Each structure stands twice: as structure tokens, then as C-alpha cells.
Image (cartoon, rainbow, N blue to C red):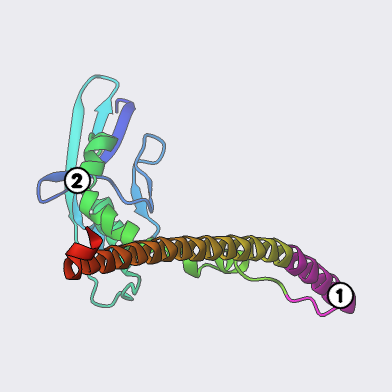
């Protein structure tokens, strides 16, 4: 019998070539038999053994595997079942980019399912929360620091308030001065008009005596 130079197993489902189960062992020139350590419901399919001899001749043996899942313990992990489902549909001769395009919708759902809200993580909460320290020395240091900050901020605010009050006082005084000036000018104009009116009236009443 000629020596076996090459031996490989392939699997196809509905005419589409897919990968052999990850739990399958053997299937090579050293151990020709394909042995399953574990069987999954996705392992069903048409298995083909291709043997190449040293004489150059080839032999192909084809068989079908059916998995009776009636008495199998059902997998409760939906994510695991999805991985097995898509793992059974992978075609060996496809590139990474082609696989990413084909699995894009499923990958989006997985990313959305695994996405975490960073604001609810303990690391984010700890960044915004001060750790309690009940030591008396820590309390005194905290009070001293808070007092110092309040004094500095208070002085700055007080200086600004005094500056604003001074500015408002000057502005009000200036406006009052302008108002008084306008009133004085108005009074002078009224007096001049009154004086001219009286003079005209006198001239109209006593024109001869004036002449």
C-alpha cells in the first residue's frame, strides 16, 4: 500500500465550505481519524477526507454527520451560541476585510451590548468623590485651608466691591452736578424770558412815556 503524503478533512454546510470544529482532533497523516472531544449542534455537516498518496493518486471519502440535540444540555449563553453560529459559517479562503464586512451588523450589536457607561464605573465615581478622613489633624488642616481660601477670596471680593461703590458714588455725584447745572441754566433762561416779557408788556402799555 503506498504511503500517505497528505491528508486533510473539510466540512461543508448546504454546499458552503466552513471550518472544522475546534474540538476535533486528528485528521492528519499521523492520526487520520477525526475525533471529536466535544460535539456541538453546529458541528453538523458534510465531512470530506482527501487523501494523497506517494504514487500521486488521490482518494476522497465523504460522510455526513448529524447531531441529535434532543438530549443535549441546551446552552444558556446567547453570546456563545452566536459565536458558534458564525464560526460555522466562516469560509477559510476569505480575507479579514471580507469577514468584517460580512459580520458588520453582528459586530455592531455585540459592541452595543458590551459597551459600558463610563460615568457609572467605580473609577469615575472615585474621581469625583473625596475619601473620608476622620483624623483630627486632617480636619484641622482642612479647616485651616478652607479659612485661608475664604480670606483670600473675601479680600479680593471686598476690594472689587469698594472699587465699584466708589465708581458708582462718583458717577452719581457727577450726574447730580450735571443736573444742577442744567437746572441753573434753565432758571436763567426762564428769568431772562420773564424779564423780556415784562419789558415788552410795559412798552406796549406805555408807548408814549417810553418814547
The spot of residue 164 in percent (x, y) is 59, 62
State left or right for residue 16 relative to residue 31. left
- Judged from the image, the secondary structure of the residue bearing numbered disc 2 is helix
205 within the magenta span? no
Q: Main secondary structure of the magenta part?
A: helix
Range of residues picked out in magenta = 132-152
Check the image and report above or below for 32 versus 148: above
Q: Secondary structure at mark 1?
A: helix
The correct choice, above or below, for 50 with respect to 145 in the image is above
Q: Residue furthest left?
A: 15
Left-right relation of 183 to 86: right
Q: Residue at x 17, y 66 (%)?
A: 204
Residue lying at the far top of the rendered structure:
55
Displayed quadrant of residue 163: bottom right
Residue at the disc numbered 1: 140
Q: How many marks?
A: 2
Q: Is residue 197 visible?
A: yes
Quarter holding residue 160: bottom right
How far apart in space, not on screen, are marks 2 and 1 (Cα)? 64 Å
Q: Quadrant of residue 95?
A: top left
Q: Quadrant of the N terminus?
A: top left
Mark 1: few, some, or many residues within 10 Å (few <14, many ≥20)?
few
**Was residue 148 drawn as part of the magenta stretch in this picture?**
yes
* Front residue of 82 and 25: 82
Judge the density around disc 2: few (<14), some (14-19), many (≥20) Cα neighbours within 10 Å.
few
Residue 90 position within the rendered picture, expressed as x and y whole percent measured from the top left: 24, 46
Mark number for residue 102?
2
Q: Residue at x 28, y 61 (%)?
A: 82
Is residue 91 shown to the viewer in this render? no
Residue 169, position as x, y percentages in the image? 58, 65
Amino acid at each position: 500500500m503506498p504511503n500517505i503524503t497528505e491528508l486533510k478533512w473539510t466540512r461543508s454546510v448546504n454546499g458552503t465550505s466552513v471550518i472544522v470544529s475546534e474540538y476535533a482532533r486528528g485528521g492528519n497523516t499521523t492520526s487520520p481519524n477525526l475525533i471529536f472531544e466535544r460535539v456541538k449542534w453546529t458541528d453538523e455537516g458534510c465531512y470530506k477526507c482527501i487523501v494523497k498518496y506517494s504514487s500521486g493518486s488521490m482518494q476522497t471519502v465523504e460522510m455526513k454527520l448529524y447531531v441529535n440535540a434532543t438530549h443535549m444540555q441546551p446552552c444558556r449563553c446567547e453570546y456563545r451560541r452566536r459565536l458558534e453560529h458564525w464560526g460555522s459559517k466562516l469560509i477559510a479562503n476569505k480575507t479579514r476585510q471580507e469577514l468584517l464586512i460580512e459580520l458588520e451588523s453582528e459586530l455592531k450589536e455585540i459592541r452595543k451590548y458590551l459597551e459600558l457607561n463610563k460615568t457609572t464605573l467605580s473609577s469615575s465615581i472615585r474621581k469625583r468623590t473625596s475619601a473620608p478622613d476622620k483624623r483630627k489633624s486632617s480636619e484641622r488642616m482642612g479647616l485651616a485651608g478652607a479659612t485661608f481660601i475664604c480670606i483670600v477670596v473675601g479680600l479680593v471680593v471686598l476690594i472689587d466691591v469698594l472699587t465699584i461703590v466708589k465708581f458708582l458714588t462718583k458717577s452719581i455725584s457727577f450726574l447730580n452736578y450735571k443736573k444742577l447745572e442744567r437746572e441753573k441754566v434753565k432758571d436763567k433762561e426762564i428769568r431772562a424770558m420773564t424779564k423780556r416779557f415784562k419789558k415788552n408788556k410795559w412798552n406796549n402799555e406805555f408807548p408814549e412815556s417810553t418814547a
